[in-house]
Image (cartoon, helix red, strand yellow):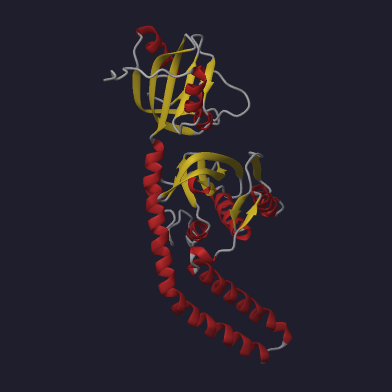
Amino acid sequence: MMEPQSKISLEPKLLLDILENMSTAVVALNSDNTYFFINIAALNMLGISNNFPDLKTLKSSVGHKSLDIHIKNVCDNKHSKMIRDFKFKNFEGDEKIVDCNISQAIIDDGNVTLIELSETGRLHSISLEHNWIEQERCVREMIKGLSNKIKNPLGGILGAAQILEKSLDDKYTKFTDIIKKETGRLVNLLNDMALPVTSVEKENINLHEATEHVIDLFKFDLKNKEVKFDKDYDPSIPDVLTNKEQLIQTLINLVRNSIQALEYKGKVLIKTRTESSYTIGNKKYQLVAKIDVIDNGPGIPEEKLKEIFYPMVTTKNDGMGLGLTIAQSIVMQNSGLIECSSKHRETKFTIVLPIRSYEDE
């Protein structure tokens, strides 16, 4: 009978191929802390794109030792170390919460420091996303129930405006035109929000055509002359299967929300990225696209974040609290999700849209 092996020996190239395709972020450092290896998941998590910054410069959050100190501790004491809920800002400035395991290994007869990063902040986000999805389902059912009750009186208003129009002088018909136009808009809005997901017409589009269109709409509005619009695009994002008009409407709602939060003075950043191995609802996707709308306004109170997509929930004195509800409903019709995070002077709404699922392979 063959003795069980206590250790499986792999060729270095095969080992690196396995690490490259793992969804866990893995970084291997040489003895001088230069990069020996880094996989795609780690590049995404650490926010590394063109150059490879020194890990020593990675900023840990207040109350957390720097990653460099933990690495030195492992190298000096020759033992592995697990750091739970390690908080840091990646090289793009995004805050991350991870379980970090640091150990030493031998590859190609040389010692390397192996760093494994498993995101735990994402678990909290998934729980919050399920809450938002449930909110959207409740809203959709409510709209279905109220749709006919609302459309019936709207139809009466439209009919009355058409009859009234015939008996008025031409100088007054502009007012009946407004009534007819706004009544029609409300009916269309109710119809769109009550549509089942399967009825949405989709096509492969370049996301940046939609973002550029929306930025131009707001940039040339004189009300926004003190708002600075910045862009940070990833040009490598492939075309995404979605409804272009609905995406534009969603972006309009989110950018308008940011501008109002800034009180028409401040900065709005539109940022695009991809992320691999991402869960939306109960489905895991191999690759998703993300569009961030980030403003440097006062932020959203933490207690409001969980209910931000409910109708009639707003932080504005003059708002109806429907813009975000409509935006979330539209994105979910396109198999995506809107996420929200906020802290002082940084509120971020993220549209997440699937690019490729594991079933597509």
Quadrant hosting residue 71? top left
Query: How far across and down, in percent of the image, does residue 319 sit?
Result: 50, 60
The residue furthest front is 1
- Residue at 49% x, 82% y: name it: 153
Which residue is pictured at 66% across the width and 47% down the height? Answer: 208
* Residue 144 occupies quadrant: bottom left
The foreground one among 47 and 304 is: 47
Farthest-out residue, bottom: 167
Depth check: 187 or 12 in front? 12
Where is residue 45 drawn, in percent x and y?
Answer: 49, 31
Does 208 sit above or below residue 330? above
The quarter in which the N terminus is drawn is top left
Q: Quadrant of residue 85?
A: top left
Residue plotted at (51% across, 71% down): 190
Question: Going by the image, does 83 lie left or right of 269?
Answer: left
Count of numbered badges drawn on the protein: 0
Quick one: 177 or 354, which is closer to the camera? Answer: 354
Above or below, 111 relative to 51: above
- The answer to whether one can see residue 307 in this image is no
Tell me if residue 155 comes above or below residue 216 in the rendering: below
Q: Identify which residue is drawn at 50% across, 78% down.
A: 151
Query: Residue 146, image x and y in percent?
Result: 42, 74
Asked if 279 appears above or below 86 in the picture, the reply is below
Q: Nearer the viewer, residue 197 or 217?
A: 197
